[in-house]
Image (spheres, rainbow, N blue to C red):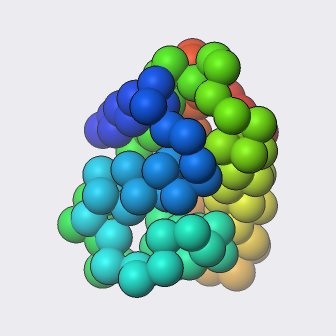
C-alpha cells in the first residue's frame, strides 16, 4: 500500500493541513478549506493524481493548534464514513486510512 507522509510541524491553520493534503494527492479541488471537497476528492473523485489504496500518515501532529487537530479528526471521520457509504452503494472499498503520529485518528 502506498504511504503519503505529511509533516504537521509547521501547520498553524486548518488550511495548512488541507493544502498539504491536496498537494500530496494532486487533487484538483479549488477550495482546500472545505472538508467535503477533500472527502469527495479522496473517496469519490477519480481526478486525483494519486489513486487509492493509500495510507495518509501525519507526523509531528502533537502540539498543532486545536483547530488543526479538530480538522484532522473531522476529515478522518468523514473519510471513514464515506468509505462505508461507498462500500454500501457499490461494494467497493477504496482502502484509504489516516494515521496521526502512528495511530488511526477516527
| Name of the residue lying farthest toward the left | 49
Identified at 30% across, 58% down, the residue is 23
- Residue drawn at point x = 46 percent, y = 25 percent: 9
> Nearest the camera: 1 or 13?
13
Q: Name the side, left or right, on which 91 lies relative to 29.
A: right
Residue 104 percent location from the top left of the image: 67, 29
Q: Nearer the viewer, residue 77 or 8?
A: 8
Q: Quadrant of residue 66?
A: top right
**Picture coordinates of residue 74 (x, y %)?**
76, 53
Residue 80 is situated, as x and y percent measured from the top left of the image, at 71, 53
18 on left or right of 51: right
State the residue at coordinates (26%, 64%): 26
Q: Which residue lies furthest to the front in this view?
A: 12
**Count of numbered tags:** 0
- Give left or right: position of 63 versus 30: right
- Using the rendered image of the protein, determine whether residue 6 is visible from the camera's viewpoint: yes
Amino acid at each position: 500500500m502506498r504511504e503519503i507522509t505529511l509533516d504537521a510541524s509547521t501547520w498553524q491553520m486548518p488550511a495548512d493541513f488541507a493544502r498539504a493534503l491536496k498537494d500530496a494527492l494532486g487533487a484538483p479541488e479549488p477550495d482546500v478549506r472545505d472538508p467535503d471537497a477533500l472527502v469527495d476528492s479522496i473517496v469519490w473523485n477519480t481526478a486525483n493524481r494519486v489513486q487509492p489504496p493509500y495510507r495518509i500518515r501525519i507526523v509531528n501532529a502533537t502540539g498543532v493548534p486545536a483547530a488543526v487537530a479538530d480538522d484532522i479528526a473531522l476529515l478522518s471521520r468523514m473519510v471513514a464514513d464515506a468509505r462505508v457509504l461507498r462500500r454500501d452503494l457499490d461494494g467497493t472499498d477504496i482502502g484509504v486510512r489516516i494515521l496521526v503520529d502512528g495511530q488511526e485518528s477516527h
